[in-house]
Image (tube, rainbow, N blue to C red):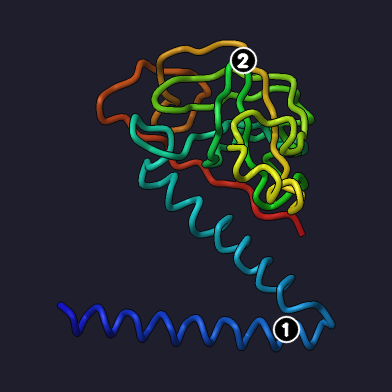
Amino acid sequence: MRRTIRRLGLLGAIAGATWIDSASRRAREHGLPLREVMSGDFRGFVTHRFNPLVMRLGLAGGRRSPWAVVEHVGRTSGRTYRTPILPMPAGDYAFIPLTYGSNVHWVNNVRKAGHCRIQLHETMLELDEPAIVGVSDNPTVPSSLRARLERSGRQYLRLHILERVPGTFDRDGSAPAVVPAEPDAHVADIPTEPAPA
């Protein structure tokens, strides 16, 4: 077992070194800072690999899951998408950290529509009034972190909670209907949108 763990660690180190080398080469070729290229790579990994895996395995929206699922409609396609998020409810509002900034597809979709739905711990939240806010407007941020996060420019999507209803999204993703929560319910595998260019 230890040998297997060491081998996996070695493979991870080799993959990491290869990724850094590739990112360094692309940064030099395009005259970009290495940090920017690596950030774009990581964002692409999360969007195209990690988020779909979380959705496919039904890890978002369940009773014990840290992730929730936001359902939003594409601004131009009109398609319904579901994306894993980490909301922080506080009273009549939910605050979602914008790890990759406010210019991502799901945030733009929610802002244009003016509303969305979130499945959190087998509870459906109907939300409206989307607004981008800073740390000072988010009561869920601990006071010990507030100054550091303000300096970093951290932003949140604040949404007003209209209604809370027990239930989950349908399993096959074919309709936006809410079905009653089941003990082993899971979220349908709906593709997430690609990261903006």
Instruction: Tell me: residue 17, above or below residue 184.
Output: below
Of 145 and 53, nearer the camera is: 145
Element on which disc 1 rests: helix
In the displayed structure, does residue 54 sit left or right of residue 156? left
Find residue 73 and report its horizontal and vertical position in percent.
Answer: 67, 32
Which dot marks residue 26? 1
Quadrant of image for the N terminus: bottom left
Task: Please report whichever mark, 1 or 2, sits nearer to the chain's N-terminal start.
Answer: 1
Instruction: Tell me: residue 189, above or below residue 128.
Output: below
Which dot marks residue 86? none
Quadrant of image for the C terminus: bottom right
Find residue 80 and report its horizontal and vertical position in percent.
Answer: 61, 33
> On the image, numbered disc 2 is attached to which residue?
92
The type of residue carrying mark 1 is Arg
Of 131 and 192, nearer the camera is: 131
The type of residue carrying mark 2 is Asp
